[in-house]
Image (tube, rainbow, N blue to C red):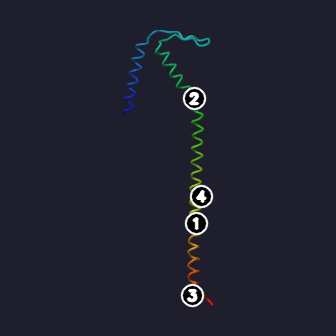
């Protein structure tokens, strides 16, 4: 709901901006000349800047995505290794307890 309200407010500002800046200007870039409303030219420049910013940030976002994927795979492998080691420790602990019980039994009932 809040995003809708913010969008409406920004849209209203854009309309007011466009209505107040209807002066026709000429923009020259290299061999091109573009005639248009000041508001349209400025909005087009802002949109172009946003697109360039998004395109520049895409490689780092892809790299970050691959890094996150690698880290998640490594986390899964480490959890499996931890589970295996925990199982080994429990097995060794039960063998140790059995050996201790056997030694206690020998100590109580020595065989001659």
The residue that label 4 is drawn on is 81
The residue that label 2 is drawn on is 55
Q: CA distance from mark 4 to mark 1?
A: 12 Å
Marked residue nearer the N-terminal end (4 or 2): 2
Which image quarter: residue 63? top right
Please identify, in this view, whether the residue under mark 4 or under mark 1 is nearer the observer.
1
Q: CA distance from mark 2 to mark 3?
A: 81 Å
In the rendered structure, are the residues bearing label 2 and label 3 in contact, judged by CB atoms less than 8 Å apart? Answer: no
Q: CA distance from mark 1 to mark 3?
A: 30 Å
* Label 4, residues with CA under 10 Å away: few <14, some 14-19, many ≥20: few
Marked residue nearer the N-terminal end (4 or 1): 4
Q: How far across and down, in percent of the image, does residue 96 sit?
A: 58, 73
In the rendered structure, are the residues bearing label 1 and label 3 in contact, judged by CB atoms less than 8 Å apart? Answer: no
Which label number is shown at residue 109? 3
Marked residue nearer the N-terminal end (3 or 4): 4
The residue that label 1 is drawn on is 89
* Label 3, residues with CA under 10 Å away: few <14, some 14-19, many ≥20: few
Q: CA distance from mark 1 to mark 2?
A: 51 Å
Residue in the picture at 39% in, 17% down: 16
Please identify, in this view, whether the residue under mark 3 or under mark 4 is nearer the observer.
3
Residue in the picture at 56% in, 25% down: 52
User: Element at badge 3?
Assistant: loop
Q: CA distance from mark 4 to mark 2?
A: 40 Å
Residue in the picture at 49% in, 11% down: 36
Marked residue nearer the N-terminal end (1 or 3): 1
Please identify, in this view, whether the residue under mark 1 or under mark 2 is nearer the observer.
1
Which image quarter: residue 5? top left
Image check: 17 left or right of 92? left
Residue in the picture at 38% in, 21% down: 12
């Amino acid at each position: 709901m809040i995003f809708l309200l913010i969008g409406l407010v920004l849209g209203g500002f854009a309309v007011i901006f466009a209505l107040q800046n209807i002066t026709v200007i000429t923009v020259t870039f290299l061999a091109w000349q573009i005639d248009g409303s000041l508001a349209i030219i400025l909005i087009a420049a802002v949109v172009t800047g946003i697109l360039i910013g998004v395109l520049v940030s895409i490689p780092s976002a892809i790299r970050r995505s691959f890094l996150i994927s690698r880290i998640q795979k490594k986390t899964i492998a480490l959890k499996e290794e931890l589970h295996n080691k925990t199982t080994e420790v429990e097995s060794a602990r039960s063998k140790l307890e059995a050996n201790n019980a056997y030694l206690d039994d020998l100590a109580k009932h020595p065989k001659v």
